[in-house]
């Protein structure tokens, strides 16, 4: 154990039940080693209401900390070791622009329900709550899209068009019923020229890490590891997902790796997602099955959380000086509502 790790562990012992460290699966091993809980976005959100500790230190990107703050108990505070770590995709949907687009869509006279991926700011979640919509994660996007479609005449899925297309494929919604909105800095571009009558409208966003994977990467992986299975996160392009054995959330990929390791010893599994997770799974199942990344893929925002920053944050918590993530009072209720709708539909 290095010096910083040892200091973090000493502080964890000192803080005891006063502090809970949570981390997303894309965090590096050095951070995961200090976490009380790791999970995907859905698991982490579900866990928050059950945490007793007055301080939650959240190792992940900003929107995840915001979701934790929305679901935290009264008197509980959420601290981010690196508040600058911000999901690149959530930055593709500024709240003001989202409001303009929802207002333009409302003017069509149709009841169009917003479904916001968890990878959005709290302000966009508040807007979603205000317009009768809900949040989803990659683990429950099918259930939530199905729910949203039953609440109105159409759905605007924000901001990941790749996840949107993959979920629509799973639900059997034809391509002819989908449209990727054309948007500029002010709102919908030439709305009268766009097919806004379609059932499923997509915000034109994507994860720049997962959308880098191309169909030829899957072909190359199959050539390099004959007989392998390839599984990917549903933020990948639909053309990539179409070539794979399966696609699913981070927790799905973890379960699938364990299943393959137990049921097909000696086989090869290629995983397309953030590489911290892939290399961790490769180490976990070494000797049972061979796990390879589809390609190098580091989320630079997740990587901003370092042991040094975690140590500083824990020290600040111990000294009573840790800045807590604050939520604008006006946004709190509608944003919470959009998250609670998801937890209510999908089970807490
Ligand atoms: P999960 O919902 O699978 O945790 O994914 C979050 C994410 O940011 C993937 O890039
Ligand atoms: Fe956001 Fe993509 Fe990073 Fe996930 S991997 S946190 S979607 S930028």
Image: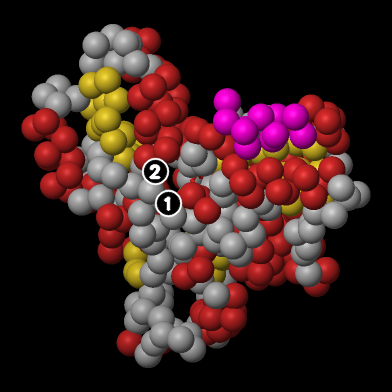
Instruction: Please give the name of the residue rendered at 14% of the width and 26% of the height, measured from the top-left corner.
Output: 225
Residue 33 location in percent, x, y?
A: 58, 29
Q: Disc number at residue 274?
A: 2
Q: Residues within 10 Å of mark 1 (few under 14, many from 20)?
A: some
Instruction: Please give the name of the residue rendered at 17% of the width and 44% of the height, measured from the top-left corner.
Output: 217
| Residue in the foreground of this view, choosing between 130 and 62 | 62
Instruction: Please give the name of the residue rendered at 12% of the width and 39% of the height, measured from the top-left corner.
Output: 220
Tell me which corner region of the image, top left, top right, bottom left or bottom right, holds residue 315. top right
Q: Residue furthest front?
A: 3
Tell me which corner region of the image, top left, top right, bottom left or bottom right, holds residue 13. top right
**Pointer 2 or 1: first along the chain:** 2
Label 1 element class:
loop
Q: Is residue 291 above or below residue 325?
A: above
Membership of 123 in magenta stretch: no
Residue 318 location in percent, x, y?
A: 84, 43
Q: Residues within 10 Å of mark 2 (few under 14, many from 20)?
A: many
Quadrant that contains the N terminus: top right
Instruction: Please give the name of the residue rendered at 66% of the width and 69% of the height, measured from the top-left corner.
Output: 123
In the image, the residue with mark 1 has its CB under 8 Å from the nearest atom of ligand 2: yes
Membership of 2 in magenta stretch: yes
**Residue extent of the magenta highlight:** 1-11
Q: Is residue 53 above or below residue 259?
A: below
Give the side of residue 22 with respect to residue 111, left or right: right
In the image, the residue with mark 2 has its CB under 8 Å from the nearest atom of ligand 2: yes
Q: Mark 1 — residue? A: 299
Q: Main secondary structure of the magenta part?
A: helix
> Do residues under tags 2 and 1 come within 8 Å of each other at their CB atoms?
yes
């Amino acid at each position: 154990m290095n010096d910083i790790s040892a200091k973090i562990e000493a502080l964890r012992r000192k803080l005891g039940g006063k502090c809970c460290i949570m981390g997303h699966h894309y965090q590096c091993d050095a951070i995961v080693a200090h976490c009380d809980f790791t999970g995907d976005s859905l698991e982490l959100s579900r866990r928050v209401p059950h945490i007793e500790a007055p301080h939650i230190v959240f190792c992940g990107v900003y929107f995840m900390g915001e979701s934790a703050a929305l679901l935290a108990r009264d008197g509980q505070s959420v601290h981010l070791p690196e508040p600058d770590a911000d999901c690149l995709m959530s930055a593709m949907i500024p709240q003001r622009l989202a409001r303009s687009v929802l207002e333009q869509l409302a003017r069509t006279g149709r009841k169009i329900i917003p479904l916001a991926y968890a990878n959005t700011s709290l302000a966009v979640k508040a807007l979603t709550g205000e317009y009768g919509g809900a949040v989803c994660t990659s683990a429950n996007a099918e259930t939530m899209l199905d729910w949203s479609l039953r609440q109105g005449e159409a759905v605007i899925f924000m901001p990941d068009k790749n996840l949107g297309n993959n979920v629509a494929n799973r639900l059997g919604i034809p391509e002819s019923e989908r449209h990727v909105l054309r948007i500029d800095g002010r709102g919908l571009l030439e709305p009268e020229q766009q097919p806004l009558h379609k059932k499923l409208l997509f915000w034109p966003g994507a994860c720049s890490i997962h959308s880098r994977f191309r169909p030829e990467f899957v072909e190359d992986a199959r050539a390099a590891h004959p007989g392998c299975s390839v599984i990917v996160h549903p933020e990948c392009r639909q053309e990539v997902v179409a070539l794979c054995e399966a696609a699913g959330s981070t927790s799905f990929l973890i379960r699938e790796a364990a299943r393959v390791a137990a049921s097909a010893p000696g086989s090869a599994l290629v995983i397309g997602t953030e590489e911290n997770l892939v290399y961790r799974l490769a180490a976990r199942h070494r000797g049972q099955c061979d796990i390879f990344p589809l390609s190098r893929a580091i989320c630079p925002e997740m990587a901003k959380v370092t042991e040094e920053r975690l140590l500083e944050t824990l020290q600040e918590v111990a000294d009573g000086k840790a800045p807590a993530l604050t939520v604008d009072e006006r946004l709190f209720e509608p944003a919470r509502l959009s998250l609670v709708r998801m937890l209510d539909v999908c089970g807490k």
